Image (cartoon, grey):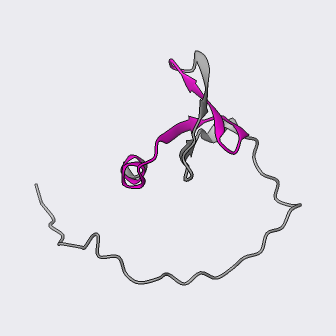
C-alpha cells in the first residue's frame, strides 16, 4: 500500500514484480498471470519498483564488499502523527 502512494507523490509510474533488469530504464515483468513477459521502459528519473522475490539467484555470503556509512536523519517529518490506540474486547 505504500509504494503506489509514494509513486503518486513523486509523480512517477510504479513498475511491479520485475523479474529482470535489462538496462537502467528497462525491465521485464510477467503479465496475464505469468503467461507472457512484458518489457517495460521508464523514462522517469526516479524509479519505484517491486521485485519478484523468486526471480533472482540468492546472493553469495562471500565475495564482494561495499562500504558501510552511518547516516543521520535530517529533521522530523510532520506529515504523519500518532493519534492514539484503542483496544476493543469482545
Q: Nearer the viewer, residue 81 or 6?
A: 6
Q: Is residue 7 magenta?
A: yes
In the rendered view, tell whether residue 83 sits above or below residue 88.
below
For the C terminus, the image quarter is bottom left
Q: Residue at x 35, y 76 (%)?
A: 77
Residue 18 horizontal side relative to residue 88, left or right: right
Measured as percent of width and height from the top left, residue 13 is found at: 46, 42
Q: Is residue 73 left or right of residue 75?
A: right
- Residue 54 rendering spot, x and y as whole percentages: 65, 37
Q: Name the residue located 39 percent from the left edge and 52 percent from the top edge.
A: 2
Nearer to the camera, 84 or 3: 3
Give residue 17's quadrant in the image: top right
Q: Which residues are magenta?
A: 4-33
Residue drawn at (51%, 17%) of the image: 32
Q: Residue at x 24, y 73 (%)?
A: 82
Residue sitting at the far right? 63
Total numbered labels: 0
Q: Nearer the viewer, residue 22 or 29?
A: 22
- Residue 73 at x, y = what percent? 49, 81
Return the residue nearer the eye: 43 or 14.
43
- Magenta highlight on residue 18: yes
Q: Position of residue 89 (x, y in %)?
A: 12, 60
Q: Residue furthest top?
A: 35
Amino acid at each position: 500500500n505504500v509504494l503506489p502512494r509514494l509513486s503518486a507523490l513523486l509523480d512517477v509510474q510504479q513498475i511491479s514484480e520485475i523479474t529482470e533488469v535489462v538496462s537502467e530504464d528497462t525491465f521485464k515483468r510477467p503479465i496475464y498471470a505469468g503467461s507472457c513477459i512484458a518489457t517495460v521502459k521508464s523514462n522517469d528519473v526516479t524509479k519505484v519498483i517491486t521485485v519478484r522475490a523468486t526471480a533472482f539467484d540468492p546472493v553469495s555470503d562471500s565475495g564482494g564488499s561495499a562500504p558501510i556509512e552511518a547516516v543521520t536523519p535530517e529533521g522530523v517529518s510532520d506529515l504523519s502523527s500518532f493519534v492514539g490506540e484503542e483496544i476493543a474486547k469482545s
